[in-house]
Image (cartoon, grey):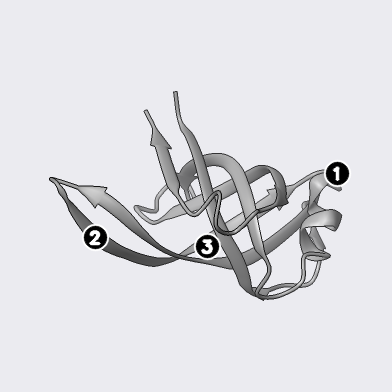
Amino acid sequence: MNQLIVVASVVEKSVLRYTPAGIPIATATLIHDSKQEQAGGQRQVEFEVPAIAAGEISKRFLEIELGVSMIFTGFLARKNRNSKSLVFHVTEFQEAEVEARNETNLLD
């Protein structure tokens, strides 16, 4: 299984574009910042990840205000067939309760 659930905020977003097949595509950069438990200690985790939303969700994805914490669900995939870079494909999102959901879950 390839599923990523992360609390993050949008720091940069593009305009809506369309594939040759007419599917709407939205891209953005998400930023995450949290403290995670690891090996009995606290670890500060900060990262940016490129994200993409395709289809019906894409228009709502671009309506997210910059800097607002959201819970994003989706999967990781290569940017393209020949790339080693990963992109987070967002399939769902909802507003986060910042204190209650300040976590990152990686599920195999």
In the rendered image, residue 35, in percent from the top left (x then y), is placed at 34, 60
Left/right of residue 106 with respect to residue 62 in the rendered view: left
Query: In the displayed image of the protein, which residue is found farthest to the left?
Result: 39
Q: Nearer the viewer, mark 1 or mark 2?
A: 2
Q: Residues within 10 Å of mark 2 (few under 14, many from 20)?
A: few
Which residue is tagged 3?
50
Residue at position x 40%, y 50% in the image: 82
Q: Amino acid at mark 3?
A: Pro
The quadrant of the rendering that contains the C terminus is top left
Residue at position x 52%, y 42% in the image: 5
Q: Amino acid at mark 2?
A: Arg
In the rendered image, residue 15, in percent from the top left (x then y), is placed at 79, 72
**Contact? badges 3 and 1 (CB < 8 Å):** no
**Contact? badges 1 and 2 (CB < 8 Å):** no
Q: Marks 1 and 2, Cα distance to the nearest angstrom?
A: 37 Å
Q: Marks 2 and 3, Cα distance to the nearest angstrom?
A: 23 Å
Relative to the observer, which residue lies in front, 6 or 57?
6
